[in-house]
Amino acid sequence: MGEALKSITERFPPRPVADVWPTTEAGIDDIVNRLESSPLREAVRHTQWCRVTGARQILGWLQQFPGASWQQRWNASPAAASGVEWNRKAVEWIASTSTGVTAPIVGSGLVGLVLADVLRPSLSWQMARRARHIQERFPLVRDPEGFARLQTLAGPAGWDSLTGRRAVNDLIKIMVAKGGALADITVGDALEYRAALQEHHTQSAGHTLFYAWLRRLGTLPDDAPTTLRNLSRATGQVGIAQLVDRYDLTCRPVRDLLVDYLTERRPELDYATLDNLSRFLALHFWADLEAHHPGINSLHLPQEVAVQWKQRAQTKIVRRRQSDGTYDEVVSPRLDSSTLLIAVRALYLDLAQWAGEEPTRWGPWVAPCPIKEADLNVKKHGQRVKARMDQRTRQRLPALPTVVLAAKELLDKAQARLQALQTAPVGGRFEVFGETFTRTQRPGSTWVYDASGRRRDLAQRERRAFWGWAMVEFLQHTGARIEEMLEASHHSLIQYRLPKTGEVVPLLQIAPSKTDQERVLLVSPELADVLSTIITRIRDPQTGAVPQVAAYDYNERVWNPPMPLLFQYDRSGEISAMNGEFLRKCLNDVLDATGLTGADGCPLDFDPHDFRRIFITDAIRSGLPPHIAQVIAGHSDINTTMGYNAIYPAEAIEAHRAFIARRRALRPSEEYRTPTSEEWDAFLGHFERRKLSVGICARAFGTACIHEHACIRCSMLRPDPAQRPRLTEIRDNLLARITEAEREGWLGEMEGLEVSLAGAQDKLAQLDAEETRQRTIDLGMPTFSNLAGRTSTANLTRRSATQ
C-alpha cells in the first residue's frame, strides 16, 4: 500500500466493528416477534415458518458460546470464520442442540437474523458466499427510503443493469457488516470494502459504482476522494525520501546526500521530472555502482569504475516474454543514455558550485566529475533521435488518409451492428455485413454470439470504435498532445468576433501540458463536426449538460478538479475520464482494420504523438509560416518547430526538380513522349537479342553493330566466365588456322585471323583480371614490438577496462 493510500485511510478510517447494539441484545422471543411482524414477515407461509424455525435453531446453538449479545456469541463460535464452510458445517453444528435441522431451514433462519440486524457477518465472511435472498429483501426491510432515492438517481437503465445490481449488492454487504442506513456509510467503509475485495482476489474494477452513487446521494464529505477507480495507482505525490528509498541504497550518507540534492532542486522541477531524476541518480547511478562494487561509499570514483559504469549506462536489461509464457532477459541499448549522463554530470557540477556558497554542507562531497563533456555527445544523440522521428513521420504521413478512412468505416460498421442488435428479439438471430449473430436471452444485454459461438459485446465494440474515430479526428485536426486532448473540456470551446468583419469564429482553447502558455486553435468545419458529435454523445440525457468528472494526472500524481471533459464515457455505469491506455487500445483497433504494414513487413503502428508530427509537418509544407506553426503547436522554441521542416528536405527536392526541368528543356521533347507499342516492343527485343554464345553484347539501344557482327573482335562484348572453355577453343582454332595460312601462303587471310586472335586473347585477359579482382588476399596485420612515444591515459584506461 502506497504512502498516499495510507494517508487516505488515516484521514477516512472505517467505522469500528460493533458487537453490541439494541437488536443483538434482544431475547429470542422478542426476535421471533420481530420476524413475525412487518416488514420482516414473509408473504409465503412456508418461507415464514423456515425463517422463524431456523432463527430459533441458530440462536439456541449460539447460547452455548460466551458473550453478552448474539453478535459476541457469533464471533466466539466457529461460524464467524466459516465463510464458505457455513453451508456444509452449519447443519452439523446446530444439530447438536436442535432437532429437525436441515440446510434450507438453517439458511433461511440466518437470512432472517441478518435482515433483523441481530447478526452482522464480517465482510470477509460475506466474500466467500452468495446470499441471494438477502439481496432481494434487504432494500425493502432496511432503509427503504434511502434505496428508493438511490434508485431514482440511478435511473431505470442503471439500476437494472448488471453493474447496477452489483453496486446494490456492494452497498448491502457494507450495511450488513457495519449496520446503519445508506447515509451512515463512510469513505472509510468503502475503502475497507475495496480492500476486502482485493484480499479475496476479486476484480475491483467493476465494484466502484456504489461509491459514485454514494457521492450522488450527497452523504459523503466534500473532501472525500473523487473516485475509487485506479486508487491503487493513484498514489499521489510522495516525498523525496520515499522516491530515493524505493531503491534500498546501502550507503546511508550517499542516500542522505541524494535526498538533500533533490530537495534543493525540487522548486524548479515538476513532479514527473523529479521522479525521473530520482530514478536516474538513485537507481541507474548509485544503486548500479553498489551492485557492481559492494562497499562503495564515495562519489570520488576510480577511473576504471567510472569507465565501467559509463559502459553499462549505454545498455539496459529488458525482460522479454517467450512463446511458452516464460520470460528471459536480454541486453538492449538505452535510448536515454545521454539524459542519464547529463543528470549525473549535473549532480557533480552542482555540488562543486554549491560548495562555494555552503562549504560545510556540500564541500565534503565535491569530487572530480566522471562524465566529461566529450562523453555526452548530445548533438549526435539528438541527430539520431531526430533521424528516427523523421523516418517514422515519412512512413506514416502517406498512410494518414487510410487510417482516417478506416476509423470512419470501423465506426459505421460497429454502429450498424449495435442498431441491428437493438431491433432483434431477445434470443433471436440477426445478420449484418454478412455476419450472423445470436442475441442473448437477457433483456437489455448487448452481448451476442457469433457463428463460431464466441461472445462479443457489441456496445463495447461500438464505444471503442467511436472513441478511436474521435481520437484520430481530433488529433489530426489540432496537432495536440494526447495529454492536452484528454484535458480538453466543454469550456475549451470559445467564440471570437473578428474585429474588422464582426464574424464570429469558434476557437478551441488548449490547456498547456509541457509549457505554461495556453494557446487557441481555430476550429475548422471538420473539427466542429467532430466536437459536436462528441458533445452530443456525452450529454446527460436528463439535464442536457456535459457531466463534470475528475481526471487523475498521472505525471503530476494529483487529482484535477471536476471538469466537463470531452473525452469521458460511461464505464460500468460510472462516468469516468478516459486515460491514454484506453485510447491507445481504440487506436490499435483502427490500425488492425487498416492492414497497413511497414517496410519490415510488420503491422504499421501509430502513436498519438505521430499525429502531432504529421500535423506540423503538413502545415509547414503547405506554406504556413514557421512562427505561426510554433504558436499553434505550443512550442517554446521555434527551432523545435523548424525541426519538423527537415523531415522532407524541401530545398533539396525543389533544386533537384528544377535541375530535371532544365535538363528536359535542353533535350528534344520527343524523348519525353509516351512510346508507342512498336517502339516498346523494339526496346524489349533489343535486350532479348543481346545474348551471344560467349557473353552479352553491351551496345546501346538504337545503335548499329560497328564490327559487322564480328563479336570476338568487338570491345562491346562482355565475356561470360562460364564460357571460358569456348573462348579457349576459339583461340586455339585461330592459332591453328594462322599456322595453316602461313603454310599455304594465304597472306591475305592471315591479317584477319590475327585481328580475331587478338580479340580472343583480350577477352581471356578480361576474364583473368575479373577473377583476380574478386579474390580476397589476406595481407595480415603488422605488429610493432617497440613503439616510440607515450601511450595515452585514455588508451591505457580503455585497455585495462577490456582486460
Image (spheres, rainbow, N blue to C red):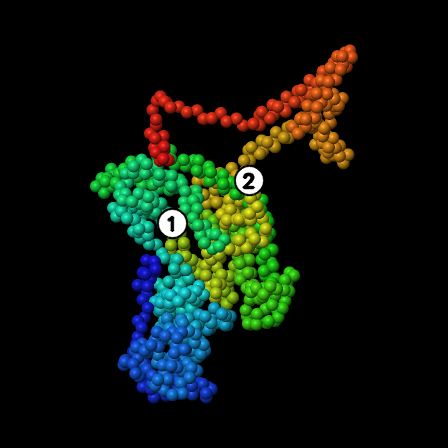
Dot 1 falls on a residue whose secondary structure is helix
In this rendering, position of residue 263 left or right of residue 506: left
Q: How many marks?
A: 2
- Relative placement, left or right, of 626 versus 39 is right
Instruction: Please report the residue visible at 44 percent of the width from the left and 61 percent of the height from the top.
Output: 549
The earlier-in-sequence mark between 2 and 1 is 1
Amino acid bearing label 1: Ala
Q: In this picture, is 250 found above or below 714? A: below
Q: Amino acid at mark 2?
A: Arg
Q: Nearer the viewer, residue 220 or 72?
A: 72
Q: Residue 442 is drawn in which quadrant? A: bottom right
Q: Nearer the viewer, residue 65 or 11?
A: 65
What secondary structure is marked by label 2?
A: helix
Up/down of 245 relative to 638, above or below:
below
Q: Residue at x 70, y 21 (%)?
A: 731
Label 1 neighbour load within 10 Å: few <14, some 14-19, many 20+? few
Q: Which residue is mark 1?
A: 272
Crowd tier of the residue under label 2, counting other residues whose Cα lies within 10 Å: few below 14, some 14–19, many 20 or above: some
Q: Which mark is residue 621?
A: 2
Q: CA distance from mark 2 to mark 1?
A: 34 Å
Question: In percent of the image, x 73 and y 15: which residue is there?
Answer: 739
Q: Residue furthest left?
A: 360
How far from the left and from the top, in percent, is residue 743?
Answer: 76, 12
| Residue 547 higher or lower than 128, as above or below | above
Q: Which quadrant of the structure image shows residue 709? A: top right
